[in-house]
Amino acid sequence: MRLRIAVALAIVYVVWGSTYLGIAVGIRTLPPFTMLAARFLLAGLLLYAWARFRGAAPTLQHWGAATLTGGGLFLLGTGGVAWAEQHVHSGVVALVVAVVPLWLAVLDRERLSPVAVLGLAIGFGGVALLVEPGAGFGWQAIVVVFTSLGWAAASLYSRRAPPSESAFLGAAMQMLTGGALLAIAGAASGEFGRVHSPSAASVGAILYLVFVGSIVAFTAYLWLLRNTRTSVVGTYAFVNPVVAVLLGWLFNDEPLTLRTLLAGLVIVGGVALIVLAPSRRYPQRHEDFQPALGEAPVR
């Protein structure tokens, strides 16, 4: 069991950390919203077919909740990531997105403890260091800070939304509705007219994001939630940014500056305090835990 847990954690750590690089490759020859729409619609259709095959069936109420959640998670959250990666290095974007647990702590006040408050101060201090004028990352990185707020708000809403029959069905509906909203955003912004001949690398990146990023890693995440402590699973929040920075440096020629390293260390430290702080709201027994896709950064 320990070996299985270690393998599943490695999948979540590396794969979700690599999705930032996957997005960067995908948008080289495809506009961001259109690329993400293709990714989430395909992944959603596959997961939806699997969930229906296993007998799960949604209601109209479920679709309404999925639309709200999918809009916050994928149109705002992941859409903001892909849009920003046109202007900002993928590793830097991953570090900024690491503020999601900090936003969750701010919005969900019952979670705040002295340790969490300290984590908030440290984490947002790291973001300020990263996006300080003169750091070279511009206002696009600041936009990601606030689109991450949409991801966090949708995550909290998903915990109160009517639960679907299975986590796979809920994830599929959120991906489908989020993908549809991304397609609408792409059409409204004139992206469809800019889709010509995507490169093999961009197509390969989409397939990687669909099958490995959205399906394999998400399955490993759900398995972990049912077989180990949630505090252990939550460590992805401060490992994914480190993986993203290293992969961007190794494979995408992204600079690894002292400021980035220092800001990343500060942000990851703050997130670690938030994730590991004692929680007064969430259930501790795994059989009572209903995982929300908002807690799984399907980037």
Image (cartoon, rainbow, N blue to C red):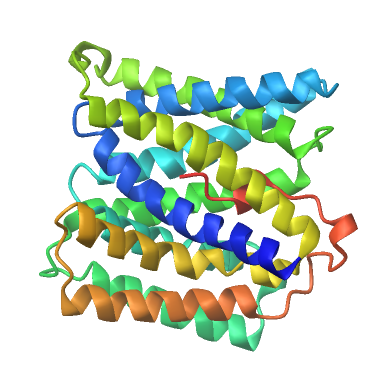
Q: Residue 68: in sight, yes or no?
A: yes
Q: Is residue 194 above or below residue 203?
A: above
Q: Quadrant location of residue 299?
A: top left
Picture coordinates of residue 159 (x, y %)? 74, 48
Q: Nearer the viewer, residue 284 or 3?
A: 3
Q: Is residue 90 above or below residue 33?
A: below
Q: Quadrant location of residue 49?
A: top right
Q: Is residue 272 above or below residue 252?
A: below
Residue placed at 60% from the left, 73% from the top? 275
Q: Nearer the viewer, residue 288 or 249?
A: 249
Picture coordinates of residue 27 (x, y %)? 25, 34
Residue placed at 55% from the left, 56% from the top? 12
Residue placed at 54% from the left, 61% from the top? 10
Picture coordinates of residue 170 (x, y %)? 71, 33
The quarter in which the N terminus is drawn is bottom right
Q: Quadrant location of residue 23?
A: top left
Q: Is residue 50 above or below residue 275?
A: above
**Is 119 displayed left or right of 114 in the figure?**
left
Q: Nearer the viewer, residue 8 or 21?
A: 8
Q: Residue 154: in sight, yes or no?
A: no
The total number of labels drawn is: 0
Picture coordinates of residue 175 (x, y %)? 57, 30
